Amino acid sequence: NHNLHKTMKKVLVAGKFDLLHPGHLNFFENAKAHGDHLTVVIARDETIVKNKGEYPNYSEQSRKQFIESLSIVDEVILGNLGNPLEIIPSVMPSIICLGYDQEILEEKIVQFCTEKNIQVPQLIRLLPYKETIFKSSLLKEALIQK
């Protein structure tokens, strides 16, 4: 069984995943296609407030439960409250998939892993999926206008 673990390719994605929509599902599917095991890191409420200045629509626990219900996802964990990159050493992914609109810079991840002396995962930017329709900020606007 030990060897099985060695060959398993772990893919990590992270985000708010507040209003789940087909774009997110496509993101998970594309990420999973790059490996065998998909870990989704949910941004903490506190982190979202700090970065965006407002609370998410759904609490971190609700968002975690939503994503746990998706069969394509193997593991769902809440992010770190301090440096969000601190989650990398605890998951040790082979690959990190980034959304086309995620602001995190690849260099930051490389630098972090190098400083921590851990293997730098392969970093893959995924392409948008019908981004003019399925983008959380646009969907939110549409919901508010109703």
Image: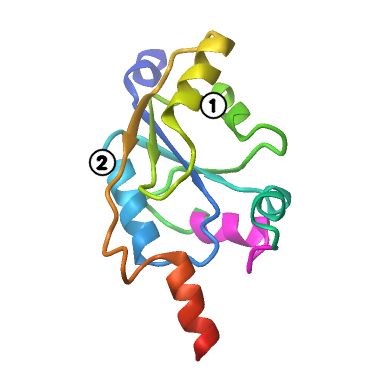
The crowd level at tag 1 (other Cα within 10 Å; few <14, some 14-19, many 20+) is many
The crowd level at tag 2 (other Cα within 10 Å; few <14, some 14-19, many 20+) is few
Which amino acid does the dot numbered 1 rest on?
Ile
Q: Is residue 144 left or right of residue 54?
A: left
Which of the image's four quarters has the N terminus? top left
Q: Secondary structure at mark 2?
A: loop
Vertical position of residue 140 compared to residue 80: above or below: below
Q: Which residue is mark 1?
A: 88
**Was residue 60 drawn as part of the magenta stretch in this picture?**
yes
Name the colouring of the figure: rainbow
Residue at (73, 50) in percent of width and height:
46
The picture quadrant where one finds residue 70 is: bottom left
Q: Which residue is mark 2?
A: 33
Of residues 81 and 70, the one drawn nearer to the viewer in this rendering: 81
| Prevailing secondary structure class for the magenta stretch in the rendered image | helix
Residue at (68, 61) in percent of width and height:
59
The location of residue 112, given as percent across then percent down, is 55, 19
The location of residue 88, given as percent across then percent down, is 54, 26
Q: Is residue 91 left or right of residue 122?
A: right
Of residues 105 and 68, the one drawn nearer to the viewer in this rendering: 105
Task: Find the magenta span and give its range.
Answer: 55-67
The location of residue 25, given as percent across then percent down, is 36, 58
**Was residue 122 drawn as part of the magenta stretch in this picture?**
no
The location of residue 101, given as percent across then percent down, is 40, 50
Q: Secondary structure at mark 1?
A: helix
Of residues 22 and 135, the one drawn nearer to the viewer in this rendering: 135
